[in-house]
Structures are given as C-alpha cells and as structure tokens.
Amino acid sequence: MDVVWDFLQVGIVGNFSWGNMAMLAIGCVFIYLGIAKDYEPLLLVPIGFGMLVGNIPLSSGMNIGIYEPGSVLFILYQGVTQGWYPSLIFLGIGAMTDFSAMLSNPRLILLGAAAQAGIFLTFAGSLLLGFAEKDAAAIGIIGGADGPTAIFLSSQLAPHLLGAIAVAAYSYMALVPVIQPPIIKLLTTRKERLIRMKPSRPVSKRIRIIFPIVAFILCAGIAPGAISLLGFLFFGNLLKESGVTERLAKTARSSLIDTVTILLGLCVGASTDASRFLTPASVKIAALGALSFCVATAAGVIFAKVMNLFTKEKINPIIGAAGVSAVPDSARVCQMVGAKEDPQNFLIMHAMAPNVAGVIGSAVAAGVFLSKFVMRG
C-alpha cells in the first residue's frame, strides 16, 4: 500500500490544483475551436494540446516539466526563449510571400504602417497600467497580430511574460474572422464597401528579385534589432523569387515551417503552467491584446478613408483592416466582407499589399523597441 500511495502522490492525487484544471479546460477549448470552428487549426490545436502537456499535475524534480533544466520540453522550449523558432518561421513566410501586390501599388504600404498604431497605443496603455517599459513594449507588439514577432520580442525583453503574450497573440490571430468584420462594418458605409479597385499592374521578375535585397538593407538599417526577423523574411523571399533556388524555397515554405510551427505551438502551450499563467498580469495582457488588435484594425480602415480624401483613385477602405500582419487571414476577411456587398468585387489581391506590409511593419516596430531598450540596458 505504501508503494501504491507513493505512486499516486506523484500525479494528480498529490499535486491537485484548480489552476491546472482550469488550464486543462482552456486547452480543450483551444482544440475545439481549432477543429470544430476551423479557427487557425495549425496554431490552436498545437497550442491547445501543449496546454494539456504543461498542466498535468505532477511532482517537481522529475525532470519532465518545461521549466526543469535538462528535460526534453525544456530543451525544445529554448527555440522559443532564444528566438530560433520565430526566425525560422519568418524564413518560411518569406518563401511563400508574393510582394507583387505591394510593389504594384506602393501607396498601400501606408495602410500597413497605419495599422501599427495599435502597437504604440498599447505600449502607452501598458505603461499606464503599471507595467515596466520592457514589459509594455513586449505587450504592445501583440497589436501587430504577428505571433512570431510577439514571441521574439517578449523572449528578449520580458521572458517572464512570454507564455501570456504568446497565447494572447495567437488567440487574436485565430479570431481574426470574428473580430475584424464588425469593426470594418462599423467604420465604413455600404458605398465605401462597394468601391472597386483597378487590377494590380504586373511586376517584373527583376524588381521582385531586387526588392528583398534593397528592402532588407533599408529596414535593417532603420531598425537593426529586427535583423533576426527581417533577414530571414527577405532571404526566404529571395530564395522564392530568384528562380534558381526553388528546392530551398520549397523546403522553407513546407516541411521546415510546418516542423517549426508544430514545435512552437506545442512549446508555447506547454509553457502556460497555471502557477505562471493565471495571474493578474495575464488578465491585463489579454485585455490589452484585444484592445490593441481592435485599434490596429480600426487604424488601417480609418487611414484608408483619409487617403481617399486626397486621391482620385479611391481605395476600398475594407483593405485597411489587412494592415495587421495576420497573413493571409486578414486579407481573406477583407475579401469575405467585400464579397457580401458585391460578390464580383475581388479585394484579396489588393488586401495582400497592406497585409505583407504589416508583417514588415510589425518586425520593424519590434526592432525599434529592441534597439531602444538594449541600448538603455
């Protein structure tokens, strides 16, 4: 009986916690939303199952948990805490991204820039709520709706908030189809939603090859802190556009990014141990993340409306919502909202321009924060 009792004490009997039970329930909800509702299943299913892995009650010292040095989970988690996974994901994103829509209509880059207002307003809001400057910067980047960038910056500036920030960022990315349509409809009229834009002009192969090289030099020169992200993003795009490294580009956008996504999602989920995750700070982060995402969406739409005041060739303000860097889901949402008003109005290619610009913009914003706080120590 002593052996049986000792055995039971190792698991849930001896380590029961209502917090762990709550996190197990949340993990199941994430899995449900990913499978039943098709909300970003490639993200929510790994994160949800990771929550189950990280919240099974067990005795400490077994060298199993994600925060126990030397354990398998701890070693895999280094890809998150050290920023390896986000950079590799950016490599895959670059290899699958076509910047032609942005290059054919460069003014749409401004919509991607405008949507980054959510980052800086959330940064200010975090400071008002009492967060330290580094913590506020890491929280603010959630407004960019870019999970890898949020993980990268928080791993450098606020590792103690990494789990809460990562879950918030990916949760709101998954809820793009739920959050964005009401904001778009609230801020636009039916007449504006019916605007048809001219087809994008073709972009030569030479320009597509030159762009990642020039863009990297310019962006990294402005925000050197973003080299780890932008370097991989533009390198992946060069592999795609060069025409001579298709094997490498195919690997980057398929098997490599899929493998890293699995590891990243599982590790992020497993890091949400109840004792670290269920805190007042996490609640504040969740609220600020929701606010930042809404502000970013609204800023893009409003800026598109402002641009229409000064241009003859009107922009459908719906595509301003794609300025958040949830690629390509925000662009798909713009297409969906526009098609409800006019099934023959194809906005997705136009929306991809601010969408990919938003990826670059959020990475640059992260680089600005990182450069600022590293310099100050």
Image: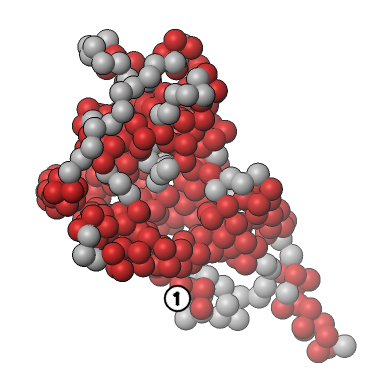
The structure's colour scheme is: secondary structure
The number of numbered badges drawn on the structure is 1
The answer to whether residue 168 is left or right of residue 152 is right
Question: Is residue 331 in view?
Answer: yes
User: Who is closer to the viewer here, 87 or 17?
Assistant: 87
Quadrant where the N terminus lies?
bottom right
Q: Position of residue 209 (x, y in %)?
A: 17, 52
Residue 121, compared with residue 1, is above or below; it is above
User: Who is closer to the viewer here, 234 or 81?
Assistant: 234
Residue found at x 51% / y 60%: 265
Q: Position of residue 326 (x, y in %)?
A: 42, 42
The residue wearing badge 1 is 75
Q: Position of residue 121 (x, y in %)?
A: 35, 30
Q: Position of residue 11 (x, y in %)?
A: 73, 74
Residue found at x 34% / y 31%: 350
Residue 179, compared with residue 136, is above or below; it is above
Packing grade of label 1 (10 A; few <14, some 14-19, many >=20) is some
Question: Is residue 322 in view?
Answer: no
The answer to whether residue 213 is left or right of residue 255 is left
Residue found at x 47% / y 30%: 335
What type is the residue that disc 1 sits on? Answer: Ile
Quadrant where the C terminus lies?
bottom left
> Dot 1: what SS?
helix
Residue found at x 56% / y 73%: 65
The answer to whether residue 270 is left or right of residue 132 is right
